[in-house]
Structures are given as C-alpha cells and as structure tokens.
Image (cartoon, rainbow, N blue to C red):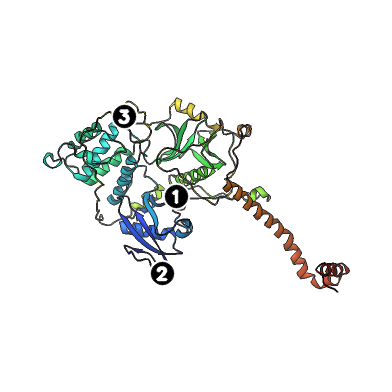
C-alpha cells in the first residue's frame, strides 16, 4: 500500500520523501515488501506522466554515493544502510536523442527542468554564446515578455542559471530575452531543448578517469554514445551503433568496438573497481536503451567448473523498452494535454554591482574549448582518432568479475576524486607496477568467497557419503571395521563398552 501526501507513519510502514525536478516534495508511506516499481509508478501517476520510462529514482547512501533505485527490487533492501524517512530524487535517467520526439508537453517540461538543473550544477558545459541563448529561453519561459516597468535593468541577476555568473552574462541574456517576445512557456521550453540537443555535453553521465599521462579526463555516457572528455571538450568517442559489448576487470573498463570490418578493444582506467562496475552497469543500460535493433540472446557454451568460474557470475541487463519502442508507444497516446503546474525557480537578491572580471563565465569547473561557430563536437577528426589509439588494447576480459556487496558507485557533483593510474591498461604493464594493498572490503569479500568455495567442496564430499550410508546402513553397521571404529570413538570420550 502506497500513500502520497500522507504524513502519517503507520505501524509496519516506512516513509520516504521524494524530491521532484521543480524542488517540490512528495511524501510516500509504503510496506516493507514494496518494490521500487510501485513507488516509481505512483510518482509518475501523481505527475500525470505516461512517457515515464525516460525517468528514474535516485538515492544517496551513507557514503554520499548516488545510486539508481532498481525498480525490480525491494526499496528497503536497497536502502538498508539508511534510516527512514528515506530520501529519493526523481530524475531523467535516459535523455531523448531528439526531445522533439517526446509526445506530450508535460514530458518535455520535465526534460526542461532536468537540463536546466544540469546547467546550474555544471554538468552541461557550453560556450558563452550558447549559454546566453539558453539563459534567455529560461527567463522567457518563467516570466514571459520583457516589461521595462515591471522588470527594470537587473532582473536577470535574480535567476541562478550557472554556478557562477557575471554581470556581462546577465546583460547579454537580457538583450536576447527582449527579442523573444511572444513565446509562451511551452514554445520557449521547446526551443531551449532544440538548442541543447546539439551540444556534446547534453545528457552526459560523466565518469572520471585518467589517461596514460595521468591527466584527468571523463568517460561520458551520452544519448549518442560514449564520449572521451578532456577539459570539458569531447576529444573522441564511440557512437552506440559501433559498440559491440562492454566489460570490466579490476580498475579497467573495456569497450569493444566494430568499425567497418575492423574490431578493436579499448581500455580505460578508473579510480577503483566499484567505479568500474558502476560505469559498466550504466553502459549496459544505455547500450540497450539506445539500441535500434533487438540482439538475439545466445546461450553460452558449458565449460568445466573451476573455482575461478564459480564466482564469475556478475550479470546485469536492462529490463525495459528501447528508445525506438518508447517513441512508438508514445505515438499511441491519445488524451487531452494534461494541465501543467509550472513552479517558479528559486530567486536570489538582485545584483547591485560586481566587477565583470571577478566571476567566471564557465558553466562548471572546467572551461570548454569551442569551435568557431560557438559549438563543440562534430564527427571524429583525424586528431581524435589519434587520441583514441592511446586507449587501444589487445586485452578484452571474457566476462565481468564476481558480484560485490556494494553494487554501484557514482562520483558526486564537484571536483573529481583523486585516483591512481598506470601508464597502460595491459596486464603486462600492470605486473611491472607495484600494486596497491587490498582494501579491507576486498579482503573480507575474498574471505567470504573462499568460505563458500570450501563449503561447496565439503558438500561434494559429504553428499555421496550420506547417500551410501542411507542405502547401505545395515550392512555397514555389521562390518568389523565399523564396530571397531565405534568402540574407539566411545572409548576416546571415556565411555566403557
């Protein structure tokens, strides 16, 4: 049973707060055995969303790591380290390649809120000129046409558009805003999405790593594919149609790519194995969602059982529609457009006077390098091919490593964490480098695996013995060897026979 809007915490129920994209909250009471799908469906029902498979629910664990809530598992089991009331965040999980394919205006509005949040939190980096135009659409969608009597000269400074914004940026936004007269919120939001979909950082899910020269870069999962991002600029990458499969081993994430008649493997070193596993899971889901064809399931050949293979059963797959299927289903929606309650953004005090050269005009921590037309990206150039060759490797593990007790990891917003990386991703170079001592969690996990393996071997020995005993019990008890052994056991415990 799920209750929304109720503040009661009934006996045997758990309560959580769900933060929406407009920063409003829902209150939810649910039973212990309720799965994530039930909570997610109720949120979408409250928002009146039918194109719901683009979205998901996130939560932050006690280690400040963010996770996507698995809709097929119990909410309580996934948040067992936290205490109620739990906190969930409704967010866009899969960005539409072309937001114009979103069938309903209410879905586009949720996308608009998400991308606006991405800009504010520095996840969507773009040029100054692009930022001016996007900021103007944001202002137009919220306050409508410019009115000199009502708005004055510094009204844009009330809006938080980027983490740090200058007076120069605000003046440029005001100039463009005056030219958008007549655009209703729905039109301004649609134009906003049409603008951002061409940016390389649109819908990016960044995962920090380092190259062979120990330079910080990111692997970004985008609607178009996997992007290699250096200093806020896409320097290379793969489109989803080129990606054959992904896997990981220890700290290295591997991608197998098919280009024309050539198949190549690429390896990227991440901060730790948990970061690798999280990237692998996200990549598997993105690859499945943005796939344009259904891949037939091929059953693997049976191999001999070995201690190593007993624990190499880490599997993960995306359960849900692909983007093409979702677009096709959306076309079947036939209902009047639902009423949209647009919530105003949080305002701050108007700017009095701040020197324009004292505040960065970047949309995030990293400054982005732009092409002459003010946009970033395009097709891969010969220089980008050279960049890509630095990560090419002949190694590609056959399967992911064993499952861990902690199932996901994501770097929080802000400066990247420090990590350690060697000059190459091949095992030969790894052997030459001094390996770091295992963490307590890795030692504990290894000990648990060895315990399970020993118990498995004991079971293989004891089960045949038990079967023989039950079938030949009377005969065994009549033998002299059994009688002698029984007498020895009794005498060793001090019994007289």
- Could you give the CA–CA distance between mark 3 and mark 1, rounded to whole angstroms? 34 Å
Q: Are the residues tagged 1 and 2 within 8 Å (C-beta)?
A: no
Q: Quadrant of the N terminus?
A: bottom left
| Residue 11, label in figure | 2
Give the quarter of the image for residue 127: top left
Q: Residues within 10 Å of mark 2 (few under 14, many from 20)?
A: few
Q: Is residue 426 left or right of residue 376?
A: right
Q: Which residue is mark 3?
A: 374
Identify the residue at horizontal 26%, vertical 47% (top origin): 346
- Provide residue 266's location: percent of width, then percent of height: 53, 35
- Could you give the CA–CA distance between mark 2 and mark 3, rounded to whole angstroms? 58 Å
Q: Is residue 270 left or right of residue 467?
A: left
Mark 2 or mark 3, whichever is nearer to me = 2
| Residue 67, label in figure | 1
- Provide residue 201's location: percent of width, then percent of height: 37, 37
Mark closest to the chain's N terminus, 1 or 2: 2
Q: Residues within 10 Å of mark 3 (few under 14, many from 20)?
A: few
Q: Are the residues tagged 3 and 1 within 8 Å (C-beta)?
A: no
Mark 3 or mark 1, whichever is nearer to me = 1
């Amino acid at each position: 049973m799920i209750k929304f809007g109720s503040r009661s915490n009934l006996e045997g129920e758990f309560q959580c707060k769900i933060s929406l994209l407009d920063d409003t909250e829902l209150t939810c009471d649910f039973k212990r055995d309720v799965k994530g799908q039930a909570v997610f469906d109720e949120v979408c029902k409250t928002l009146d969303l039918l194109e719901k498979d683009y979205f998901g629910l996130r939560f932050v664990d006690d280690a400040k790591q963010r996770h996507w809530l698995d809709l097929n598992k119990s909410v309580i089991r996934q948040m067992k380290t936290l205490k109620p009331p739990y906190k969930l965040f409704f967010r866009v999980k899969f960005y539409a390649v072309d937001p114009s394919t979103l069938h309903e205006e209410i879905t586009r509005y949720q996308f608009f809120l998400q991308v606006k949040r991405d800009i504010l939190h520095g996840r969507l980096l773009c040029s100054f000129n692009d930022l001016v135009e996007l900021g103007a659409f944001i202002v137009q969608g919220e306050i409508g046409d410019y009115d000199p009597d009502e708005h004055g000269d510094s009204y844009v400074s009330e809006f938080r558009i980027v983490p740090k914004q200058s007076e120069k940026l605000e003046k440029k936004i005001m100039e463009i805003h005056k030219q958008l007269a007549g655009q209703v919120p729905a039109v301004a939001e649609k134009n906003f999405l049409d603008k951002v979909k061409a940016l390389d950082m649109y819908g990016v899910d960044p995962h920090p790593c380092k190259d062979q020269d120990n330079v910080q870069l990111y692997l970004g999962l985008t609607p178009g594919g996997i992007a290699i991002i250096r200093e806020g600029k896409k320097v290379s990458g793969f489109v989803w149609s080129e990606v054959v499969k992904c896997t990981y081993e220890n700290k290295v994430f591997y991608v197998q790519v098919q280009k024309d008649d050539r198949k190549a493997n690429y390896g990227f070193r991440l901060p730790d194995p948990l970061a690798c596993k999280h990237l692998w899971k996200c990549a598997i889901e993105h690859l499945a969602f943005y796939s344009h064809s259904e891949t037939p399931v091929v059953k693997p050949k049976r191999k001999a059982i070995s201690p190593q293979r007993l624990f190499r059963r880490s599997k993960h797959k995306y359960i849900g529609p692909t983007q093409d299927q979702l677009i096709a289903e959306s076309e079947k929606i036939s209902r009047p457009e639902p009423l949209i309650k647009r919530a105003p953004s949080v305002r701050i005090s108007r700017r009095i006077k701040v020197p324009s050269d004292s505040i960065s005009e970047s949309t995030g921590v990293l400054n982005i390098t732009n092409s002459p037309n003010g946009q970033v990206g395009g097709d891969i150039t010969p220089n980008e091919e050279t960049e890509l060759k630095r990560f090419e490797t002949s190694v590609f593990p056959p399967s992911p490593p064993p499952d861990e007790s902690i199932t996901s990891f994501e770097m929080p917003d802000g400066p990247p964490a420090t990590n350690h990386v060697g000059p190459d991703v091949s095992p030969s170079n790894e052997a030459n480098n001094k390996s770091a001592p295992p963490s307590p969690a890795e030692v504990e996990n290894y000990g648990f695996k060895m315990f399970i393996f020993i118990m498995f071997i004991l079971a293989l020995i004891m089960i045949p013995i038990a079967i023989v005993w039950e079938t030949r019990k009377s005969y065994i008890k009549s033998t002299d060897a059994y009688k002698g052994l029984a007498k020895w056991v009794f005498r060793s415990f001090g019994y007289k026979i």
